[in-house]
């Protein structure tokens, strides 16, 4: 079910402002790909362009090609809603729906799309998604309680459960651990390892160690200079990136000499 | 030069953390003394109660501030003075409200009985009892019709402004017009409805629905503004979360945005209803005045509570005044109930934090 993503010559704009320029990369199916780089270099913007969430912001647009298993995402007849059903997303800040219980939050993707399902089927989806997100044992006795009542780390795992409940092909994660403590972070990193067997995962992180721990391949984004658009400096296997990167500025960034 | 350098500022190195405090009972004592001192004026000069209270308050604020300035610091003296001033302003604001409620309750309560609430003012002989049933029904029917017209228009307009317009020229134009509409004098809304119905149905047409149209002109801008505020409070995070699950925009709006802000929207609608339920002028023009109960808003005159109060005061006999006060009390109670309902509904539908 997992799919690979081919990106070629992608330029991303906010209105007239060119935010990210000329990105080429291939994201492997059933692997974890991490993006690192200083703030404001366009990692998140690029990530959001992979499931057409970018255009939710007024004036934002994209030029270039994003191919998911041979299908171009930005053809005029492609429905962004259908794209987002295939490519799920987890955000930086946990955002469970405040009006819904834990149970309803997990089913939100199905319910919001008015998918009819039997109670048993719904129960099964909830349990398997929560198990998949390592949250089942913690919440199984209080599924009817509001999702906002969980701790930050639990909320984030609830959001991951919600994202995998609709069984996407690809899971995009935008700094999913930046608001979490080390223990929750490690729970989510374990989870990413497990999810890798079924999903294609793309993760943006500011934590270099995290990129090194969880990812198979790493892309380093940077700005040429202040006010210039961000671009992809280097894209390589994580091992190579952290041991012996091709690019000097990558090495400087990773070893902490700048940024 | 050297002298200034060598003398270390001994005092500043130990900033005092404590200073004198007035005892807890100080404000109470000052209040008693101030009232007693100001009581000399009524005793010696024959002043009334109101000047006595005013002078007491001045004495209290001055006395407490001075005492605090002597014993405590300058800052806490200012603090005590401003605190007293704020409380005084609060008390002044309460005076008309309490006075109004007291007058309405004390004068209106004797008029309330079962006949008053279940009979209309229509009578065929002079010894028949009269009531305000027709006006209660008229108020409920006209207000309900006004809400039925205004709520969908207002909420849809607000959804357009927040979810689709997002600062384009049309949305800015609508926002401006809504603001202008908020300021329309109610008599102008009545004239508009009156001339519109005259154009459609000929001269002299009057009915409850005309009143409802006039009231909805006053209600729509309030509903739009309050709904707009509530929709803006819904974080964009939630919209993005729904989009990322592959939810179409209209479902995101109905199932996430509206659902999250439902409590606030219902509260806003209820308060808007409470605001228009007391309107008199437009209904005098277009809904007419009758003593009979009329439940059909599309045919015949309809009297509402405020219009009935107005007409009773016009008549001017003591019995009519009693009826008017009783009616005023009923109206105040209805508005009060609407406000309580708004609070309860807002609580029920508010997003639950679970903490």
Image: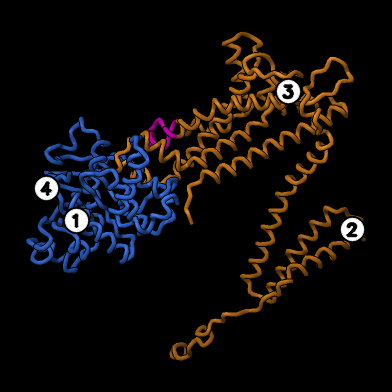
Chain colours: A blue, B orange
Look at mark 2 in the image and give the residue it sits on: B42
Cα gap from disc 4 to disc 2, whole angstroms: 91 Å
Cα gap from disc 3 to disc 2, whole angstroms: 51 Å
Question: Closer to the observer: label 3 or label 1?
Answer: 3
Residue B163 lies in the magenta stretch? yes
- The span picked out in magenta is B159-173
- Number of marks: 4
Locate residue B159 relative to residue A21 in the image: left or right. Answer: right
Badges 4 and 2: C-beta atoms under 8 Å apart?
no
Disc 1 with disc 4 on a shared chain: yes
Q: Nearer the viewer, residue A138 or A77?
A: A138
- Quarter that holds the N terminus of chain B: bottom left
Badges 4 and 3: C-beta atoms under 8 Å apart?
no
- Residue drawn at 21 percent across, 65 percent down: A209
Q: Which mark is residue A35?
A: 1
Task: Classify mark 1: helix, strand or loop.
Answer: strand
Give x and y (percent) for residue B148. Answer: 55, 26
Circle 3 residues within 10 Å: few <14, some 14–19, many ≥20: many
Disc 4 with disc 3 on a shared chain: no
Look at mark 3 in the image and give the residue it sits on: B134
Circle 4 residues within 10 Å: few <14, some 14–19, many ≥20: some
Residue B128 lies in the magenta stretch? no
The subunit letter for the residue under badge 4 reads A
Of labels 3 and 2, earlier in sequence is 2
Look at mark 4 in the image and give the residue it sits on: A24
Cα gap from disc 4 to disc 3, whole angstroms: 76 Å
- Residue drawn at 32 percent across, 38 percent down: B247
Locate residue A111 relative to residue B157 in the image: left or right. Answer: left
Give x and y (percent) for residue B213. Answer: 58, 22
């Amino acid at each position: 079910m997992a799919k690979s993503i081919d990106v070629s010559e992608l330029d991303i704009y906010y209105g007239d402002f060119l935010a990210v320029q000329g990105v080429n990369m291939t994201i492997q199916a059933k692997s974890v790909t991490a993006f690192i780089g200083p703030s404001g270099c366009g990692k998140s913007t690029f990530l959001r362009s992979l499931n057409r969430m970018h255009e939710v912001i007024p004036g934002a647009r994209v030029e270039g090609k994003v191919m998911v298993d041979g299908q171009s995402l930005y053809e005029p007849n492609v429905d962004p809603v259908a794209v987002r059903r295939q490519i799920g997303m987890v955000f930086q800040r946990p955002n469970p729906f405040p009006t819904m219980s834990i149970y309803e939050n997990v089913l939100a993707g199905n319910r919001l799309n008015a998918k009819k399902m039997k109670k048993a089927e719904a129960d099964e989806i909830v349990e398997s998604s929560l198990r998949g997100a390592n949250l089942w044992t913690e919440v199984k006795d209080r599924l009817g309680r509001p999702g906002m009542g969980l701790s930050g780390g639990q909320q984030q795992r609830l959001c991951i459960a919600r994202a995998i409940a609709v069984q996407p092909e690809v899971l995009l994660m935008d700094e999913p651990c930046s608001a979490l403590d080390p223990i929750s972070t490690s729970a989510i990193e374990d989870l990413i390892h497990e999810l890798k067997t079924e999903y294609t995962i793309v993760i943006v992180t500011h934590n270099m160690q995290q990129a090194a721990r969880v990812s198979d391949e790493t892309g380093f984004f940077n700005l040429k200079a202040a006010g210039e658009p961000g671009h992809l400096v280097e894209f390589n296997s994580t091992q190579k990136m952290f041991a012996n990167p091709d690019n000097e500025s990558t090495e400087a960034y990773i070893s902490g000499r700048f940024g | 030069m050297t002298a200034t350098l060598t003398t270390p500022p001994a005092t500043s190195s130990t900033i005092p953390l404590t200073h004198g405090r007035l005892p807890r009972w100080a404000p109470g004592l000052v209040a008693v003394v101030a009232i007693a001192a100001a009581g000399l004026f009524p005793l010696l000069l024959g002043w009334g109660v109101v000047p006595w209270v005013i002078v007491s308050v001045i004495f209290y604020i001055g006395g407490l501030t001075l005492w605090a300035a002597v014993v405590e610091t300058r800052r806490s003296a200012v603090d005590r003075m401003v605190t007293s001033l704020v409380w005084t302003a609060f008390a002044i604001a309460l005076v008309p409200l309490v006075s109004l409620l007291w007058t309405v309750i004390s004068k209106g309560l004797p008029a309330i009985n079962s006949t008053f609430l279940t009979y209309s003012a229509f009578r065929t002989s002079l010894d028949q009892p009269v009531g305000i049933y027709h006006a209660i029904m008229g108020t409920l029917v006209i207000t309900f019709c006004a809400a039925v017209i205004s709520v969908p228009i207002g909420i849809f307009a607000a959804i357009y402004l927040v979810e689709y317009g997002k600062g384009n020229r049309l949305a800015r134009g609508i926002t401006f017009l809504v603001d202008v509409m908020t300021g329309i004098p109610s008599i102008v809304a009545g004239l508009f409805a009156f001339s519109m119905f005259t154009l459609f149905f000929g001269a002299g047409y009057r009915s409850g629905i005309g009143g409802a149209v006039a009231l909805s002109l006053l209600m729509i801008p309030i509903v739009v503004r309050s709904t707009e505020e509530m929709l803006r409070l819904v974080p964009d995070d939630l919209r993005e979360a729904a989009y990322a699950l592959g939810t179409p925009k209209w479902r995101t709006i109905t199932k996430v945005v509206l659902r999250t802000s439902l409590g606030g929207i219902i509260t806003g609608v209820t308060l808007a209803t409470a605001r228009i339920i007391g309107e008199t002028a437009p209904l005098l023009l277009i809904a007419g005045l009758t003593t009979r109960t009329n439940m059909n808003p599309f045919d015949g005159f309809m009297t509402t509570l405020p219009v009935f109060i107005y007409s009773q005061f016009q008549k001017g006999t003591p019995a009519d005044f009693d009826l008017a006060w009783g009616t005023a009390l009923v109206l105040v109670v209805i508005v009060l109930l609407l406000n309580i309902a708004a609070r309860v509904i807002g609580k029920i539908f508010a997003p639950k934090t679970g903490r």
